[in-house]
Image: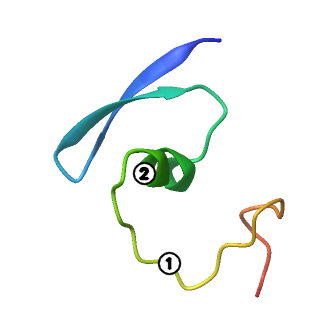
Amino acid sequence: MSTVTLNINGNEVIAEKGLTILEVAKRSDIKIPTLCHIKGKPADNPC
């Protein structure tokens, strides 16, 4: 699978294309405060 390099809060991480920034951050132990995130639901899903 293809990868991309991202910079999240000063941390350079390599991520698989298709993942959300939140998924990449969690896998990299980077905490991003969220009000609502329901796995499997689209990003525009109201909670």
Q: How crowded is mark 1: few (under 14 residues within 10 Å), some or many (20 or more)?
A: few
Tell me where residue 16 appears, x and y as whole percent: 56, 25
**Residue drawn at (80%, 61%) of the image:** 42
Identify the residue under disc 1.
34
**Residue drawn at (38%, 45%) of the image:** 28
Identify the residue under disc 2.
25
State how the image is colored. rainbow
Name the side, left or right, on which 5 lies relative to 47: left
Vertical arrangement, residue 31 with respect to residue 18, above or below: below
**Residue drawn at (42%, 51%) of the image:** 25
Q: As drawn, which residue projects farthest toward the top?
A: 1
In the image, what residue type sits under mark 1? Thr
In the image, what residue type sits under mark 2? Ala
Quadrant where the image shows the N terminus = top right
Image mark count: 2
Name the side, left or right, on which 9 lies relative to 32: left
Vertical arrangement, residue 40 with respect to residue 18, above or below: below
**Residue drawn at (66%, 73%) of the image:** 37
Vertical arrangement, residue 21 with respect to residue 18, above or below: below
- Picture quadrant of residue 47: bottom right
- Picture quadrant of residue 45: bottom right
SS at mark 1 in the image: loop
Vertical arrangement, residue 35 with respect to residue 3, above or below: below
Q: How crowded is mark 2: few (under 14 residues within 10 Å), some or many (20 or more)?
A: many
